[in-house]
């Protein structure tokens, strides 16, 4: 009798499993398809899947060094940068930064001179107007034309970063701006920051002659070490590149902002 009941239960379970919908969709391989704009809906869907995965790979650093966005991802990057996702992702990073800073200060972990380091390009300022007419990262970087854009000094603020910047000032955090721009661009950078709504920073650090040729990791690590030697406690560091954040000494917490347009080592 027990055996009969057991067989009946097993039969019912097998029938239920056969009728159930699969919970996980099996991914059979890397999405393939024609380049963006080159075909029908199937190809476009494939490109969107591929490019979303590619963006995740470059944002997490899994992709390693890269020189240009894949040609099939040009439309994807344009839509990301011009749409709501870029602003939303930036706002989430800013909210996480503020929450951490408030907790650190409340627990007394900020020290006597709590500081926060910000990168400038694609962190405080967005160069989207420049990249909109220069291929969104699909073209080889042109230093001359980018320097001309810097001289115009009209890059807008990244709204979430400007809000975070002002909130940090209200908390009494010392604001340090550490950029890969060169010293000859100091005036244009200051003018642009003021134009975008930033003010009252503690320091604006740019590359000096001995820094030319250094990687961003080496240059920025050395500058963070100098800040610590001056007595600053670097609570946080915000940047759109991993090279803004990596290297010793590091901040207590580092916050990566989105940037699918270019990579700096």
Image (tube, rainbow, N blue to C red):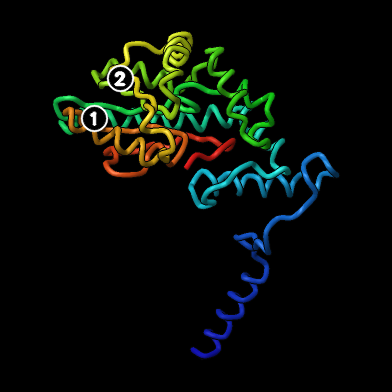
Task: Report which quarter residue 21 is drawn in.
Answer: bottom right
Counting from the top left corner in percent of width and height, residue 225 is at 24, 36
* Left or right: 192 as drawn, with respect to 85: left
Q: Could you say which is closer to the camera, residue 102 or residue 76?
A: 76
Residue at the spot 35% in from the left edge and 38% down from the top edge? 254
Q: Residues within 10 Å of mark 1 (few under 14, many from 20)?
A: some
Residue under label 2: 203
Counting from the top left corner in percent of width and height, residue 62 is at 51, 52
Counting from the top left corner in percent of width and height, residue 264 is at 50, 39
Residue at the spot 33% in from the left edge and 44% down from the top edge? 247
Task: Report which quarter residue 92 is drawn in.
Answer: top left
* Left or right: 238 as drawn, with respect to 4: left
Residue under label 1: 227
> With respect to residue 108, does 193 lie above or below?
above
Q: Which of disc 1 and disc 2 is earlier in sequence?
A: 2
Counting from the top left corner in percent of width and height, residue 127 is at 56, 23
Residue at the spot 37% in from the left edge and 19% down from the top edge? 165
Task: Report which quarter residue 172 is drawn in.
Answer: top left
Q: CA distance from mark 2 to mark 1?
A: 10 Å
Question: Going by the picture, which residue comes out furthest to the front?
Answer: 209
Viewer can see residue 79: no
| Label total for image | 2
Q: Could you say which is closer to the camera, residue 172 or residue 151?
A: 151
Question: Going by the picture, which residue comes out furthest to the right?
Answer: 39
Quick one: SS at disc 1? helix
Q: Residues within 10 Å of mark 2 (few under 14, many from 20)?
A: few
* Left or right: 147 as drawn, with respect to 38: left
> With respect to residue 2, does 58 lie above or below?
above
């Amino acid at each position: 009798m027990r055996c009969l009941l057991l067989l009946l239960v097993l039969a019912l379970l097998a029938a239920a499993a056969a009728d159930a919908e699969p919970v996980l969709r099996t991914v059979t391989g890397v999405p393939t398809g024609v380049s963006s704009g080159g075909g029908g809906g199937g190809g476009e869907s494939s490109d969107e899947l591929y490019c979303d995965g590619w963006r995740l790979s470059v944002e997490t650093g899994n992709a390693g060094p890269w020189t240009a966005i894949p040609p099939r991802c040009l439309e994807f990057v344009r839509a990301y940068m011009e749409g709501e996702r870029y602003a939303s992702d930036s706002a989430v990073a800013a909210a996480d930064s503020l929450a951490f800073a408030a907790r650190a200060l409340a627990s007394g972990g900020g020290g006597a001179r709590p500081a926060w380091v910000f990168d400038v390009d694609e962190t405080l300022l967005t160069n989207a107007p420049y990249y909109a007419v220069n291929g969104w990262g699909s073209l080889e970087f042109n230093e001359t034309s980018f320097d001309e854009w810097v001289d115009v000094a009209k890059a807008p603020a990244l709204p979430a970063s400007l809000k975070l910047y002002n909130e940090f000032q209200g908390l009494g955090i010392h604001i340090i701006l550490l950029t890969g721009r060169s010293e000859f661009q100091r005036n244009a950078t200051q003018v642009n920051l003021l134009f975008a709504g930033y003010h009252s920073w503690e320091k604006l650090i740019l590359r000096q002659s001995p820094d030319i040729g250094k990687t961003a990791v080496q240059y920025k690590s050395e500058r963070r070490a100098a800040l610590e030697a001056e007595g600053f406690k670097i609570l946080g560091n915000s940047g759109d590149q991993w090279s803004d954040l990596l290297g010793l000494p590091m901040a207590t917490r580092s916050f990566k902002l989105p940037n699918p347009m270019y990579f700096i080592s």
